[in-house]
Image: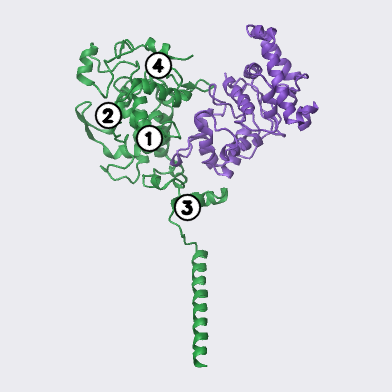
Chain colours: A green, B purple
């Protein structure tokens, strides 16, 4: 009898413990504890409804609310909603306008034919990682630059963008353009330690491809992956109101031979991480090949031009990173600021 | 609505339809008059116009206007899309895709199969030349949320999601030959397209762009975006 009594007591104990454990689990679940560290699952949970999204947005800035695990390791600049409604906020807002539509808001400093905007190379208006975001740049200046062999502060760095990428002229240091772009960059960098190299800053160093970059292969990559938006002739596409919707990649309307993007390695890195827009899936080799192709076309003269292509090439350029001064399709790159006739022959139009 | 294009009884019979398509196709390529007409754009336009307004009784092709309106403005309530002023490339590709099965639609698939390549081309040109419809009055929706406006103008880059405006223009007016206008389309049509892309029921288009984008949108976001563009003013001649 005592034996069977013991047995019964054991069974009751076990049942009791199981119920207790279940209660603990249930209580924890009710309390909102997450049982999954899987970020993908958390992302799903963050999208269930507009109401939930609003709730999330009220406690957390909206730009932060989703993304893969990898994205979460990058710095997130502040939300536009946090911009104060005062003079500083106004200057920052003006900076973003200049950034997104440079021709309209800083046209005096943009080259005559140039149609680019800062945001064409610094995606998401300077917010996107691996696309030279402003939040990673601001805290790295003043800095020595080999390009002009001196220490540059941030204003000088921006002036360089206007001289080269915008094929225009440097806005004065005290111009509203420079002041606003600095204010915008400063604000995006809120919380970034001074002098700290941030993950996702600049354009990443890309591994070298297995085969030497090829113009011919690049041409094919271009036709299949780039021409839809940038045009068969590389001249971009316009919206109905005449605004440039997709930037030109070469020719008079694009960056000049002194811009960073004319370097094959820089263009390849930008492309690998960002192009095609929203679907950056090119292989390493394809990115290098198409960068080689794009940077083997005519574009405006290097502002440092000495009067001789050979001398300018010797002084500032050189293979394999710069095609300046090289002969492509019978045309010596850098020899004329005009679009090469070869471009037109290539076009399928 | 099925009756619109099922007036001739043989449509209900799949084999009969196939045979009919074959006969139509052969007769069109074999008619010397039609081949010669290729050189005369105006003749082509006139025949496209006839198709648009009267269809083709012999082959059973209904008039386009019976569903898409005399001015290509579509029928908002029924979800039939606006066709006027859509880019030619885009338009032709849709008819080709309906015919090949890459894009599925119970109404349009059988009709597109009956159209010859030449007819599809001519219709694409005809509608591309049509002025964009003016905004239908009284179609004001509730104001879009900040979240929706961000998707429209900025995208969501943490998921590599570009803004709608990037490829369809600031006002959704369309860009070039491959990015059609969104304005002047009904919310129900836009919603269905986004959901079809999201669920692999419509070919994702050039470079798979729209499939990639729709899969990153929640159903609530799709509803809000469809509502937003349906209530934007369609601009006269917005693809020009």
Above or below for A6 versus B69: below
If you read the primary sequence from the N terminus, does the residue marked by circle 4 or circle 3 appear first? Answer: 3
> Mark 1 near mark 2, Cβ–Cβ under 8 Å?
no
> Mark 3 near mark 1, Cβ–Cβ under 8 Å?
no
Give the alpha-carbon distance from disc 4 to disc 3, as whole Å: 47 Å
- Chain of the residue under the numbered disc 1 shown in the image: A
User: Toward which corner of the image does residue B59 lie, by quadrant?
Assistant: top right
Depth check: give the residue in front, B195 or B240.
B195
Residue lying at 38% horizontally and 15% vertically, measured from the top left? A252
Number of residues whose C-alpha sits closer than 10 Å to that of mark 4, classed few (under 14), some (14–19) or many (20 or more)? some
Q: Work out whether residue A173 can be spotted.
A: no
If you read the primary sequence from the N terminus, does the residue marked by circle 3 or circle 1 appear first? Answer: 3
Residue lying at 25% horizontally and 23% vertically, measured from the top left? A320
Q: Work out whether residue A308 can be spotted.
A: yes
Number of residues whose C-alpha sits closer than 10 Å to that of mark 1, classed few (under 14), some (14–19) or many (20 or more)? many
Give the alpha-carbon distance from disc 4 to disc 1, as whole Å: 28 Å
Give the alpha-carbon distance from disc 3 to disc 1, as whole Å: 25 Å
User: Toward which corner of the image does residue B201 lie, by quadrant?
Assistant: top right
Residue B15 location, x and y as percent? 72, 29
Residue B103 location, x and y as percent? 61, 31
If you read the primary sequence from the N terminus, does the residue marked by circle 1 or circle 2 appear first? Answer: 2
> What element does badge 2 sit on?
helix
Residue A186 location, x and y as percent? 34, 39
Depth check: give the residue in front, A183 or A37.
A37
* Residue A42 badge: 3
* Residue A20 badge: none
- Disc 4: which residue: A113
Are the residues under badges 1 and 2 in a single subunit?
yes
């Amino acid at each position: 009898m005592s034996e069977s009594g013991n047995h019964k007591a054991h069974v009751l104990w076990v049942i009791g413990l199981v119920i207790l454990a279940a209660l603990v689990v249930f209580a924890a679940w009710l309390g909102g504890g997450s049982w999954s560290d899987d970020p993908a699952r958390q992302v799903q949970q963050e999208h269930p409804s507009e109401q939930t999204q609003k709730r999330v947005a009220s406690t957390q800035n909206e730009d932060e609310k989703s993304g893969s695990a990898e994205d979460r390791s990058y710095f997130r600049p502040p939300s536009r909603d946090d911009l104060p409604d005062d003079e500083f906020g106004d200057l920052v807002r003006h900076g973003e306008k200049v950034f997104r539509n440079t021709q309209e808001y800083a046209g005096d400093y943009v080259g005559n034919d140039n149609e680019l905007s800062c945001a064409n190379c610094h995606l998401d208006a300077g917010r996107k990682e691996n696309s030279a975001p402003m939040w990673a740049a601001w805290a790295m200046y003043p800095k020595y630059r080999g390009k002009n062999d001196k220490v540059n502060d941030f204003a000088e760095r921006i002036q360089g963008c206007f001289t080269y990428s915008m094929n225009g002229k440097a806005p004065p240091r005290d111009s509203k353009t420079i002041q606003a772009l600095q204010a915008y960059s400063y604000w995006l960098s809120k919380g970034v330690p001074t002098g700290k190299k941030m993950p996702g800053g600049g354009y990443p160093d890309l591994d070298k491809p297995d085969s030497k970059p090829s113009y011919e292969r690049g041409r094919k990559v271009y036709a299949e992956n780039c021409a839809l938006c940038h045009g068969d002739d590389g001249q971009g596409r316009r919206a109905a109101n005449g605004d440039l919707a997709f930037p030109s990649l070469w020719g008079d309307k694009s960056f000049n031979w002194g811009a960073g993007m004319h370097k094959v390695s820089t263009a390849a890195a930008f492309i690998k991480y960002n192009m095609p827009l929203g679907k950056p899936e090119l292989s390493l080799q394809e990115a290098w090949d198409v960068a080689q192709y794009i940077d083997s076309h005519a574009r405006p003269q290097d502002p440092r031009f000495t009067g001789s292509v050979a001398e300018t090439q010797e002084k500032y350029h050189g293979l394999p990173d710069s095609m300046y001064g090289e002969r492509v399709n019978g045309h010596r790159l850098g020899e004329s600021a005009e679009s090469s006739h070869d471009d037109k022959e290539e076009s399928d139009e | 609505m099925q009756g619109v294009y099922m007036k001739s009884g043989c449509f209900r019979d799949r084999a009969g339809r196939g045979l009919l398509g074959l006969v139509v196709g052969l007769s069109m390529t074999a008619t010397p008059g039609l081949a010669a007409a290729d050189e005369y754009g105006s003749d082509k336009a006139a025949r496209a116009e006839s198709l648009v307004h009267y269809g083709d009784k012999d082959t059973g092709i209904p008039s386009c206007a019976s569903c898409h309106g005399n001015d290509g403005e579509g029928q908002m309530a029924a979800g039939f899309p606006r066709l006027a002023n859509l880019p030619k490339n885009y338009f032709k590709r849709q008819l080709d895709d309906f015919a090949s099965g890459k894009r599925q639609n119970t109404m349009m698939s059988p009709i597109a199969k009956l159209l010859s390549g030449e007819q599809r081309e001519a219709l694409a040109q005809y509608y591309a030349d049509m002025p964009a419809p003016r905004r239908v009055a009284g179609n004001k929706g509730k104001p879009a949320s900040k979240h929706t406006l961000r998707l429209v103008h900025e995208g969501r880059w943490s998921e590599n999601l570009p803004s709608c405006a990037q490829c369809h223009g600031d006002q959704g007016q369309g860009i070039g030959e491959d990015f059609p206008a969104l304005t002047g389309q009904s919310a129900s049509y836009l919603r269905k397209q986004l959901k079809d892309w999201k669920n692999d029921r419509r070919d994702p288009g050039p470079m798979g762009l729209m499939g990639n984008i729709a899969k990153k949108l929640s159903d609530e976001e799709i509803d809000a975006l469809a509502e937003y563009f349906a209530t934007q003013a369609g601009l006269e001649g917005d693809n020009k």
